[in-house]
Image: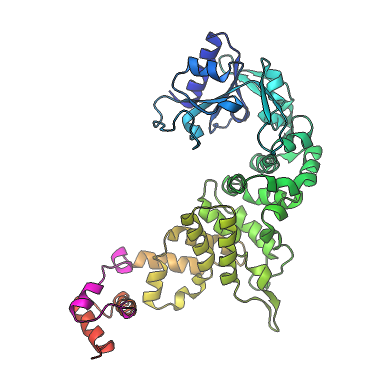
């Protein structure tokens, strides 16, 4: 049973027990747009306890807010306990929410009080945007619209339900969501809604950094990153969430290398090239690759220069990623992308050993794609990209990453005392091995005894 079929079955079962029930929210919007919903939500007048009686296999992860998760049969088994603190993947469940009216949002996210309701019309009034406030009876395909969502879908408008300031006051993250939806669907934002975002932009800091991070990542990876970041800048939210990116505006570049314009324009062009569903690390690497240029900008006698921008940018990228609580693995890869993005320029002049080590970078495909996008967003010369790609064809994997000719154990067996010198010796041997100048253990040990003689 696929998710839509099971969501329909949930609605049918609730109705069979005497309750109102509809599909609601983004899944209805996507179905009306001819898109495949990522997940399905059901809205009902059944209380959480009633839902859990009807569907015994449930996860009450949000029962205090009227939300119960019903696992989809035949999906990967879920292991979260009934009161799980760890979110259950939405693609594996149907989220069933009780009609409610929320009272007060003093923390800018959670309602101070939840009052259950018997009215679907009252329930949708608390939702964020009109296009997300539509109800659908999946058994008849009848759409119920209390908020003007169908008209806004037709007009291609993002508009809050009711007063924008009130909706954003309930959850400040909705401001970022409005921009993301506008970018994703190519819609305009209603004037009153956009004015409220501009007015309240500095209150985005009430939202947890993890939630802001996740929204930014969605903006970057849904296939419309450029428009999303243009809207971030126009709304005033960019200077609040990523001031380092805002500072790229107006930072000129040498036209002989960057005919496209300043660092901001270059970065937008690069974001425009990101493919939908690209990796989060590639997306962040693309966004941050030139983040070190604004603080290192100077006009030299010959041209504009950014001395040390790679080193400065790598540190800044790490700080930004730590601020938004990326995983250590993600931070390491994003920093590596920033740190290595200029190394392609040296590839044709690299010693063979250096080139082989360069192409051994973890997730080399992301480094290659960042370099390709960087070139296409400036001078459009892909010769260095093609050079490295050709070298990868010419060099078999066993030449790029051969088994070591010798190890530390071999050095100890030869009478060398373990210590810092081991690293220097093994690195020197590896370089000569990669260059084809040492081909056996015997040759390697002969080189070691000659170049690193033991002292008595």
Q: Please determine whether, in this image, residue 120 is positioned above or below residue 307.
A: above
Chosen colour scheme: rainbow
Residue 428 placed where, x, y %? 32, 80
Q: In which quarter of the image is the N terminus?
A: top left
Residue 83 placed where, x, y %? 49, 30
Residue 179 counted in the magenta span: no
Residue at far bottom of view: 456
Lateral position of residue 264 relative to residue 58, left or right:
right
Q: What stretch is highlighted in magenta?
A: 396-422
Residue 160 placed where, x, y %? 74, 33
Q: Residue at x 61, y 61 (%)?
A: 377
Residue in the foreground of this view, choosing between 327 and 339: 327
| Residue 441 visible, this angle | yes
Q: Which residue is drawn at 73% across and 46% down?
A: 203
Q: In which quarter of the image is the C terminus?
A: bottom left
Q: Please determine whether, in this image, residue 80 is positioned above or below residue 308.
A: above
Q: Please determine whether, in this image, residue 248 is positioned above or below residue 154.
A: below
Lateral position of residue 248 relative to residue 362, left or right:
right
| Number of marks in picture | 0
Residue in the foreground of this view, choosing between 58 and 262: 58
Residue 41 placed where, x, y %? 57, 26
Residue in the foreground of this view, choosing between 371 and 122: 122
Lateral position of residue 244 relative to residue 454, left or right:
right
Lateral position of residue 396 relative to residue 112, left or right:
left
Residue 407 counted in the magenta span: yes
Q: Which residue is drawn at 78% across and 46% down?
A: 198
| Residue 406 visible, this angle | no
Quarter of the view holding residue 373? bottom right
């Amino acid at each position: 049973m696929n998710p839509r079929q099971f969501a329909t079955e949930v609605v049918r079962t609730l109705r069979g027990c005497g309750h109102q029930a509809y599909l609601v929210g983004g899944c209805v919007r996507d179905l009306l747009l001819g898109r495949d919903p990522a997940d399905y939500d059901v809205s009902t007048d059944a209380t959480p306890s009633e839902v859990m009686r009807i569907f015994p296999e449930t996860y009450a992860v949000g029962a205090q807010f009227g939300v119960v998760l019903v696992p989809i049969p035949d999906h990967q088994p879920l292991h979260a306990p009934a009161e799980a603190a760890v979110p259950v993947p939405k693609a594996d469940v149907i989220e069933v929410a009780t009609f409610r009216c929320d009272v007060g949002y003093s923390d800018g996210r959670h309602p101070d009080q939840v009052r259950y309701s018997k009215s679907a019309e009252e329930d949708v009034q608390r939702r964020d945007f009109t296009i997300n406030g539509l109800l659908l009876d999946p058994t008849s395909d009848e759409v119920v619209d209390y908020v003007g969502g169908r008209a806004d879908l037709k007009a291609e408008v993002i508009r809050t339900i009711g007063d924008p300031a009130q909706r954003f006051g309930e959850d400040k993250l909705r401001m970022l969501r409005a921009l993301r939806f506008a970018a994703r669907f190519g819609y305009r934002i209603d004037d009153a809604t956009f004015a409220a975002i501009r007015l309240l932009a500095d209150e985005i800091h009430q939202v947890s950094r993890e939630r802001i991070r996740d929204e930014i990542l969605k903006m970057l990876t849904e296939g419309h990153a450029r428009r999303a970041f243009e809207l971030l800048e126009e709304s005033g939210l960019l200077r609040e969430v990523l001031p380092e990116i805002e500072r790229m505006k107006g930072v000129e570049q040498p036209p002989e290398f960057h005919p496209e314009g300043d660092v901001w324009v270059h970065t937008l062009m690069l974001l425009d090239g990101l493919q939908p569903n690209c990796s989060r690390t590639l997306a962040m690497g693309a966004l941050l690759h030139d983040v070190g240029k604004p603080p290192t900008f100077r006009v030299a006698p010959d041209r504009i220069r950014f001395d040390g921008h790679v080193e400065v940018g790598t540190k800044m990228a790490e700080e930004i990623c730590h601020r938004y609580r990326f995983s250590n693995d993600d931070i390491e890869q994003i920093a590596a992308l920033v740190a290595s993005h200029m190394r392609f320029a040296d590839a044709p002049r690299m010693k063979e050993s250096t080139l082989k080590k360069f192409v051994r970078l973890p997730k080399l495909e992301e480094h290659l794609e960042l370099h390709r996008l960087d070139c296409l967003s400036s001078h459009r010369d892909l010769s260095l990209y093609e050079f490295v790609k050709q070298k990868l064809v010419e060099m078999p994997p066993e030449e790029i990453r051969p088994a070591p000719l010798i190890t530390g154990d071999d050095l100890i067996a030869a009478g060398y005392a373990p210590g810092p010198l081991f690293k220097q010796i093994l690195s020197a041997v590896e370089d000569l091995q990669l260059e084809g100048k040492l081909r056996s253990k015997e040759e390697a040990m002969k080189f070691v005894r000659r170049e690193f003689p033991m002292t008595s």
